[in-house]
Structure formats: C-alpha cells, structure tokens
Amino acid sequence: MEAVAALPLFLRPRGGLERVRGVEFVEMPVHRIVNRCSSDRMPFRWTINPYRGCEFGCVYCYARYTHDFLELRDPMDFERRIFVKRMAAEVLAHTLSRTPIGDDAIAIGTATDPYQPAERKFRLTRSMLEVFANLSGLNLSITTKSALITRDLDLLGKINRRSHLQVNFSLITLDRRLQRILEPRAPRPALRLRALNELARAGIRCNLLMMPMIPGLTDDPARIENVIRAARRAGADGVWWRSLYLKPAAARRFVPFIRDHFPHLAPRIDDLYGRHVYAPAAYEDRMSAIFDRLRRRHGFAISRDRDKSTNLAGDSAPRQLSLVAS
C-alpha cells in the first residue's frame, strides 16, 4: 500500500472494510460518481461505476488499467482489492441536481460489474437505482454478467416506465468449462440467460454482448451461433460484439494466461496484438461478416458501423430529463 499512501489525500482509500474469500474490500472516498466520457468510440456521454475492481476476475478484462491509477500494477490486484464507493447514491443525487445531463446517455458498469458479489452486501447499485427511479426522461443502460440484477426488478420496472432503459448481459461462450477458466468467479451462462429472460418478460429491453471475441477461443462461427440462438430464445432484443481489446494492464494478465492454458494460441495472440491494443482490420472484417450473417439468420439487427462499441446506451429518440414525484 506504499503507492496508495503516496496519492493525494482526496484519492486515498479510507481503509479496509473487510476481507472475504481472499478479497479485500476498501472504502474509497467519493467526490464524483458520474464521469464524462469523451471518446468518440463510445455511444454514451456519462459513465457510472460504483466499485473499482471486480471480483469476477475475467482474464481478458480491459478495465484492469483503472487500478494503475492507484499505482496498483499487479494484475491480480484488480480482482483481489475491490474499492467500494460507499457514498455513491448520495453523490449521484447531488450531481443530478446540479449537472445538466439532459438526454445524454448514462452507462452503468463500463469498468466494473455493478452486480459483482460485493453488491450483495454493499447494495450500492441498488441505492443508485433508487435515485434514478425518482426521475424521468433518462437514457440509461446497465451492463453486467450477474443474475443478481433480478433482485432489483422492482426498481428496474419503475425506471423502465419513466425513462429509456436497457440492460446488457455479457456472454461470450456457452461452454461452461471454457467460461470457468476465462471468467473464474462469474455466474455460469445458464444463469445469465435466465436473468435476461426474466427481465425481457418484464418488458425491459435486453441485449446480449459477445465481448470480447478471443481469437482461437470464442470466435468459431458454430460457437458464436450457439450463443446467438440462445439469446434469441431468451428474448434478447439485440446481439452485439467486439473483438479483444488488449491494453497493457490487461495484457499483463491475459498474455501469461494464454501461454499457461493455451500455449498453442500464444503465437497467434502475439502476432495479432504484439504491437497493438486492437485486432487488425482483416480480423475485424472477417468477424463482422460472420456476425452479420448469423444475426440475420436469427432475426437480429445488424450494424453498419462495426457495432460501434455495441450500441450500449440505447437508440431511442432523446428525452428531456425531469424530476417527478416518487
């Protein structure tokens, strides 16, 4: 924690809350919970992440770089040291009362899963949904791997009636054995599909995100079609994809993992990502053609913009944000 101690006071965590399952939970001061996204690659203007780090431990997770900001460069810190933004709902309410968000899209869960195991105890995501449920005219999306989201169906239904809401379920394979080693502590595929179906039957628009496509592991057309078919049966409105995005912080975890578990794929990963964080254009073109063909076959819309980071935040007409009585 020497590196953390060297941070400015306003960035330092306030100390350990507890340690469970070998994971340390640390309270982090919150001065801002709604963050502006300036990237043209993203379809949303604002992001919210109630936790920093994620216990699911997905080996490919691009968001490991967020721990670099705290000088925590061991790639395992991202899943072993989870920062809990205890005052998230209070700060959110204050922000929405003062910040002109208007009809800009807000995405929850862009750098951490808002329904990871910590949510069962700390309930930060639910507390923020309670704030959103008292508003109308929002354009809100939530991205998760967890079936825990069904716990909040009461609030999601209320938000859905007053605003534009969509929930994105991340699922890259139906192969349970492969999923367990890629996403060690994430819920199994069947649970995610069941949760998607429950929300869809409640009238909430749900998408399935096949992200990332990992060369040689999850990008076989037959495997892709199995997921797309399951998404259709579960009631998904859309299926979106993106290839592996390998920033240095993610590579420190992912590349050794490939060499240990799939050594035959290591040369291919080195060839594709040795000097780049994005897959080459030729790979993107091939995957785009596969997805267009399979989505069309199963009745899903296709994109002419390479799934521009997935349509994560909705595509309805803009709505004016306004306060309403709860």
Image (spheres, rainbow, N blue to C red):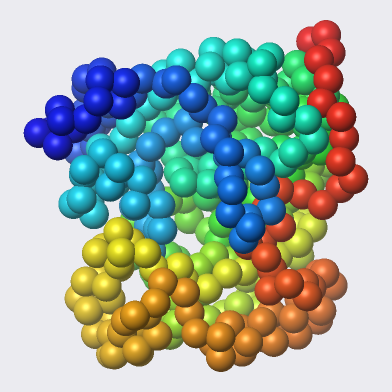
Q: Residue at x 24, y 85 (%)?
A: 263
- Report whether 311 appears left or right of 262: right
* Residue 249 against residue 92 in the figure, above or below: below
Q: Position of residue 285 (x, y in %)?
A: 63, 87
Q: Position of residue 209 (x, y in %)?
A: 62, 61
Q: Residue furthest left?
A: 2
Q: Residue at x 78, y 30 (%)?
A: 102
- Report whether 76 appears left or right of 246: left
- Report whether 239 appears left or right of 320: left
Depth check, front residue: 67 or 169: 67
* Residue 134 against residue 251 in the figure, above or below: above
Image quarter of the N terminus: top left
Numbered marks: total: 0
Depth check, front residue: 321 or 212: 321
Q: Is residue 27 visible?
A: no
- Asked where in the image residue 308 lies, by quadrant, the reply is bottom right
- Report whether 285 appears left or right of 262: right
Image quarter of the C terminus: top right
* Residue 164 against residue 130 in the figure, above or below: below
Q: Residue at x 67, y 22 (%)?
A: 99
Q: Is residue 106 visible?
A: yes
Q: Position of residue 172 (x, y in %)?
A: 53, 67
Q: Position of residue 292 (x, y in %)?
A: 74, 81
